[in-house]
Image: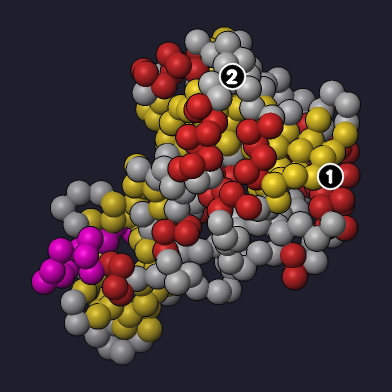
């Protein structure tokens, strides 16, 4: 399929620059695949669509990345994008300018923090060591910036607004944004009406921001992302009496990567390169919640595989017409 089949017109002013308050008051577009009809609701009305016996699967990854700005001892400016914490104060990171920061380089971020470039990986990422006179976990929130997506130009006053309320497992470079709409009270209401809540983990990589890299959809290469499904989570998912509802494309990819039979997943921690395109046969996911994605992205391709490209693009055109808010801090879509 040609990548151009996943284009649509997105006015720049519809790209949400800040989250709505309260979280669950975002708009919710409901797509019914069986009748090809669309409803317009609010996210807190999700309780009207999920039923006793359904399982809602959430990604509990936590954004651990930080963007640091500093200078080399020679005075040149440098940027360090911390991605994943390793051990002994070391991190995987992106560095800029890469060619001018070879192994052994130092970047002074603040009086409290230096970054030492230790090694270069084949992927182009670096292994860096953070050196500080104070605990690094206390220093980073003071000197670092939350690495928001490149289309968001406004800094958050509260960094926790780019975390889900159930974020627990550090390791993501970006938030699983479909989950940003949930509040503790909404989750409690869903549980009270018999919806089972299950948490799995997929650490989102920077590839989530990259558009399709080729003119043919199928030729795009997916980079790996690590996921974990505990034995308890797998048992709960596999015992679901109602529908298995995935929150976000990260949960969709995790569940389908772990599928070993219809409505059955295997527990474990693995790397997934799964790329879901139209024609894919879904084995586990029976409904999904997602945000509105950029044109020509793997997320839009995945959603189109689940609900049908023409139906999805019709819904997107209607969302533009009705002035929905798009992308990470935007409104949501429920596909049944």
Decide if residue 270 is in sight here.
no
Q: Is residue 321 left or right of residue 269?
A: right
User: Whole-percent x and y of residue 128?
Assistant: 27, 61
- Residue sitting at 35 percent across and 86 percent down? 76
User: From the viewer's perspective, is residue 258 above or below residue 189?
Assistant: above
Foreground pick, 327 / 282: 327
Q: Split into 4 quadrants, where in the image is the N terminus?
A: top right
User: SS for tag 1?
Assistant: helix
Q: Split into 4 quadrants, where in the image is the C terminus?
A: top right
Q: Quadrant of residue 127?
A: bottom left
Q: Is residue 165 magenta?
A: no
User: Whole-percent x and y of residue 311?
Assistant: 86, 37
Q: Is residue 122 magenta?
A: yes
Q: Quadrant of residue 137?
A: bottom left
Q: Is residue 313 left or right of residue 263?
A: right
Foreground pick, 291 / 66: 291
Q: Which mark is residue 94?
A: none
User: Whole-percent x and y of residue 62?
Assistant: 39, 48
Region rendered in magenta: 121-139
Residue that badge 1 annotates: 315
As measured in the structure, the alpha-carbon distance from the residue carrying label 1 to the one carrying label 2 is 28 Å
Residue that badge 2 annotates: 52
Q: Mark 1 vs mark 2: which is more N-terminal? A: 2
**Dot 1 alpha-carbon crowd within 10 angstroms: few under 14, some 14 to 19, many 20 or more:** many
């Amino acid at each position: 399929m040609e990548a151009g089949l996943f284009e649509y017109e997105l006015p720049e002013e519809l790209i949400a620059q800040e989250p709505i308050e309260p979280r669950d008051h975002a708009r919710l577009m409901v797509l019914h695949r069986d009748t090809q009809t669309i409803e317009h609701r609010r996210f807190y009305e999700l309780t009207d669509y999920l039923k006793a016996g359904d399982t809602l699967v959430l990604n509990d990854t936590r954004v651990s990345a930080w963007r640091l700005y500093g200078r080399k001892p020679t005075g040149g400016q440098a940027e360090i994008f911390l991605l994943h914490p390793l051990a002994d104060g070391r991190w995987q990171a992106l560095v800029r300018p890469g060619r001018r920061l070879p192994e052994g380089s130092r970047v002074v971020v603040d009086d409290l923090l230096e970054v030492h470039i230790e090694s270069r990986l084949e992927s182009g990422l670096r292994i860096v060591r953070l050196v500080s006179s104070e605990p690094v976990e206390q220093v980073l929130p003071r000197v670092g910036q939350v690495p928001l997506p490149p289309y968001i130009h406004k800094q958050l006053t509260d960094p926790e607004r780019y975390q889900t309320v159930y974020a627990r497992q550090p390791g993501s470079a970006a938030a699983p944004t479909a989950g940003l709409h949930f509040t503790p009270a909404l989750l409690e209401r869903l549980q009270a009406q018999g919806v089972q809540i299950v948490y799995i983990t997929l650490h989102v990589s920077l590839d989530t921001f990259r558009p399709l890299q080729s003119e043919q959809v199928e030729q795009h290469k997916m980079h790996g992302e690590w996921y974990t499904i505990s034995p308890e989570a797998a048992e709960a998912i596999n015992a679901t009496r109602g529908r298995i509802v995935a929150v976000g494309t990260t949960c969709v990819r995790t569940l389908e990567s772990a599928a070993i039979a219809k409505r059955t997943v295997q527990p474990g921690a693995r790397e997934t390169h799964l790329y879901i395109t139209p024609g894919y046969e879904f084995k586990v996911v029976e409904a999904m919640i997602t945000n509105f994605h950029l044109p020509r992205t793997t997320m839009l391709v995945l959603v189109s595989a689940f609900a049908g490209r023409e139906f999805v693009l019709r819904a997107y055109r209607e969302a533009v017409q009705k002035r929905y808010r798009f992308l990470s801090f935007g409104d949501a879509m429920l596909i049944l």
